[in-house]
Amino acid sequence: MNKSGKIRKSDATRARIIEAARERFRKEGFERTTIRKVAGDAGIDPSMVMRYFESKRGLFAAAMTVELRIPDLSGHPRDKLGEALVSHFLKRWEESEDDSLQLLLRSTASNEDAAERARAIFREQIVTTVARLRGDAEAGEVAALIGTQMIGLAYARYILKLPPLLAMPRQAIVRRIGATIQRYLTEPLVADQDISDQPSGWRKPGSIE
Amino acid sequence: MNKSGKIRKSDATRARIIEAARERFRKEGFERTTIRKVAGDAGIDPSMVMRYFESKRGLFAAAMTVELRIPDLSGHPRDKLGEALVSHFLKRWEESEDDSLQLLLRSTASNEDAAERARAIFREQIVTTVARLRGDAEAGEVAALIGTQMIGLAYARYILKLPPLLAMPRQAIVRRIGATIQRYLTEPLVADQDISDQPSGWRKPGSIE
């Protein structure tokens, strides 16, 4: 076997372990999952799992790593960015074969390692996307506002399963929540020191208020 | 002791049991909490806890009951309703002596009884408020949209603790998220069947788009 063949085999083993780990963490939670059980599920010696991930916490962090796969929207019509992001997000939740996002979000409620993974994903994937679309200044704040709306959409629809939101067609959500993301993404934030002097937290030239 | 004295004593006992139950559920989760432990913490016989709450699930449901205490906003300036709701919500989370909201939200991630309590609170307190402020038609849908933003704000700030959101002054959040709640609350929803024909999910007469 040549070197790239070895790498491919190693990647496949790693992926098999992560898949087994996700299944165990999902069913039994962090506390009751053991390296031994995951190794058994993956048909691999426990020492191999340790070699790849060092500890149960290392394995958990790897299992909680989620690629949001946000598309490159640099050529997208600027007034449709909000809808494009919500549309991608709904597809990522509803059509993806893996439910790693659901596992991550549920785990953050009771596990600080999972919350730290979520913050890393926010930093590395959401803040980066916002910075690319509107520049570095305020990217963290704008990403955080977008985060509140996206996390809440996921939580209300996929975990709490609020009936009117379950019944709402995907395209309606794209339009309604998309308009919110659009505002957070493209309208200027008022500097915090200006807030007490402003009639509104957002400057909306030409809009009626 | 007269009758109202008895009622007061019974209320106080009930409150003491619920307080002890919340503490146990918070520390040990649903599975490891027992009626016996809660009774011990409250200094009460386990049979009394059973008499009040019937079962551990009954006790959990009672401990998960949260009063949002949404104020009567019927006389409030109509264009400031969004900010008023966000302001109330932040105070409710940050200044309340009880952390029942945090316990409820965390519990919904892994416990279906808690999720059902959250749906009941949504129905009885949020949908009702929206119906009072804008009428019954679409109250469920509008409340669900508001719910996505409010739940996500709570989750991102108090559970994930996203750094840019923790750093954001409360008044800035009131302005920025308040503008979103304002839109969800007061702008007409496009009927779902119209959505594919509309350039935007929201009719905004006079606004620039």
Image (cartoon, coloured by chain):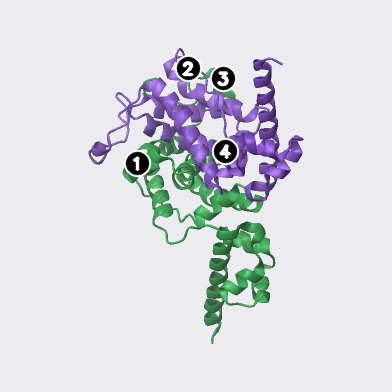
Chain colours: A green, B purple
Question: Between tags 4 and 3, which lies in front?
Answer: 4
Point out residue A68 in the picture as x, y percentages from the top left corner.
Answer: 48, 54
Give the CA distance from mark 4 to mark 3. Answer: 42 Å
- Secondary structure, mark 3, is helix
Question: Between tags 1 and 4, which lies in front?
Answer: 4
Identify the residue under disc 1. A168
Give the CA distance from mark 3 to mark 2. Answer: 22 Å
Quadrant including the C terminus of chain B: top left
Chain letter for the residue marked with disc 1 in the picture:
A
Quadrant including the N terminus of chain B: top right
Amino acid type assigned to the residue bearing label 3 in the image:
Ser
From the viewer's perspective, tell me whether residue B204 is left or right of residue A100: left
Question: Between tags 4 and 2, which lies in front?
Answer: 4
- The crowding category of the residue bearing disc 2, from other C-alpha atoms within 10 Å (few below 14, some 14 to 19, many at least 20), is some
Task: Tell me the tag on residue B61.
Answer: 4
Give the CA distance from mark 1 to mark 4. Answer: 28 Å
